Amino acid sequence: GSIEQQIKRNQLQEAAHQLNLLAKTALHDPRIFLLGSRLAEAASNPDGMLQAARKAYQLAPQWPVAAIHLASVLASRGEAEEAMASAALAIQQATTSGSLGSQLLNKAAGVAHTLGRYQQALGWLRQSEELDPRDTSTRYKIGLTLLSSRAFSGAVDIFTALLVQRPGNPSILSARLQAFLGEKNLELAIQDGEALLVQDPTNAEYQFYLAIARGETPRTQPASIVLGLFNSGADRFDRHLVVQLRYKLPRDVAQMIKAWHPDGKGDVLDLGCGTGLLGACLGPIEGVLVGVDLSEQMIAQAAHHNVYDSFHRVNVLDALQATPGDVYHVITALDVLIYVGSLEDVIPNAHRILLPGGRFVFSCETGVDGAADYALQSTYRYTHQRGYVQRQLDAAGFKDIEMEDRVLRHEAGQPVQGFLVIARKEAQATLKAVTRKRTTKKVPVWPPKSPT
């Protein structure tokens, strides 16, 4: 109890001390290692989290609680087959012992949902609903799972029924709005969006979905949507991108940076750094490497590479606007602008904060011929037209602009077409070389009061 409360209050050192004391007298108690796994999760230590979860299961292989916790940890790492097998085992064990309840079934459904196994998730959720028909939270999860699996009509039916019981509930109303968008029922989507904005007029997420329903293209994705997308899968992100999606941009761009700055003294701003794949490929450098990302969990993963000098948890647009001029040799934004539509603030600010001769390197998904300058897809990611990008770069004053067609990654086995842009800020011969005194302990370039 007290250790769990310490973990919830983020008193991790105190919790670790208490666990160590308990372990001396109860080393073979699986509950110690379950708590240790949760402590490792709170400390952003995914390997420790898995190690403790496995130890708890080894100590109590017939205990459904240990099996389902192990399944959840494996799912968070993207280890799908073992995670699903462990979840199924937990349900089997609980069924055999007569202890199967809705809580265990909901946890198993969460494992399946995390891994995109929506039909299995639905099966376990409906089994849970049979055990406790009055539990509206399970019904809501069924609706969300139908929404994720693009069964929009079924999701609408569930959310509509729930709204009869809980009129105006914003979470249910927002979910139904997204389901209406999915089935192209724009009139009803607009009604839900307007109802949500009456409750919360400044909510950027509601504004975003309502704009889509009205046939408008929002200038950018709200931070809350991007954050929700990446926080939930930070510890399996590297494996998913590199192995399943065959993502090679960080490796290729790191090689370019090494060629441009063979002495390693270039200062780099990595926008949307994610789990730090660029830094991992770049390795330690003499210059300053700064990572910017919205997701605290992503930053925690990136920190494990021990190559970034500082991190700032802020969105890309705010980072660019707040950074002073003439600071960096290289700015990167790899697989980032698919969440930013308009580039009219991005590109001029990148030009401003680059040192003379510095380079802005970024990727875009390719828009279909004849589409708008930037367009929102059904995935809620943006495509960009090359001509639009070229015009923005020219207007900002970039020179030596290169655009290379690339397969950015693979999704559902299909290549995602895009292009990589390298744009250089003109070197001004009249300016003296910019130098900064370096210390053995590198300090953040920007901003001094930002979270690190």
Image: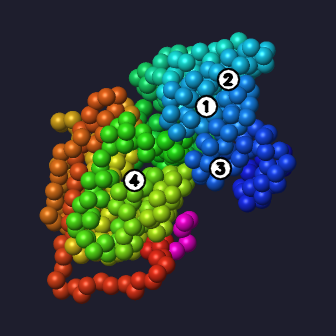
Q: Nearer the viewer, residue 367 or 446?
A: 446
Is there a contact, CB below 8 Å, between mark 3 and mark 4?
no
Was residue 70 drawn as part of the magenta stretch in this picture? no
Name the mark nearer the viewer: 1 or 4: 1
Callout 1 amino acid:
Ala
Q: Is residue 105 above or below residue 331?
A: above
Query: Disc 3 on helix, strand or loop?
Result: helix
Q: CA distance from mark 4 to mark 2?
A: 35 Å
Residue 159's x, y, as percent?
A: 60, 22
Lateral position of residue 281 relative to residue 451, left or right: left
Q: Which residue is mark 3?
A: 40
Which quarter of the figure has residue 323? bottom left
Give me the disc on residue 71: 1
Q: CA distance from mark 1 to mark 2?
A: 9 Å
Query: Residue placed at 25% from the left, 85% from the top?
Result: 433
Give me the disc on residue 277: 4
- Specify which label sits upstream in the sequence, 3 or 4: 3
Query: Disc 4 on helix, strand or loop?
Result: helix
Q: Which residue is mark 2?
A: 90
- Specify which label sits upstream in the sequence, 1 or 4: 1
Query: Mark 1 Cα within 10 Å, few/some/many (few <14, many 20+)?
Result: many
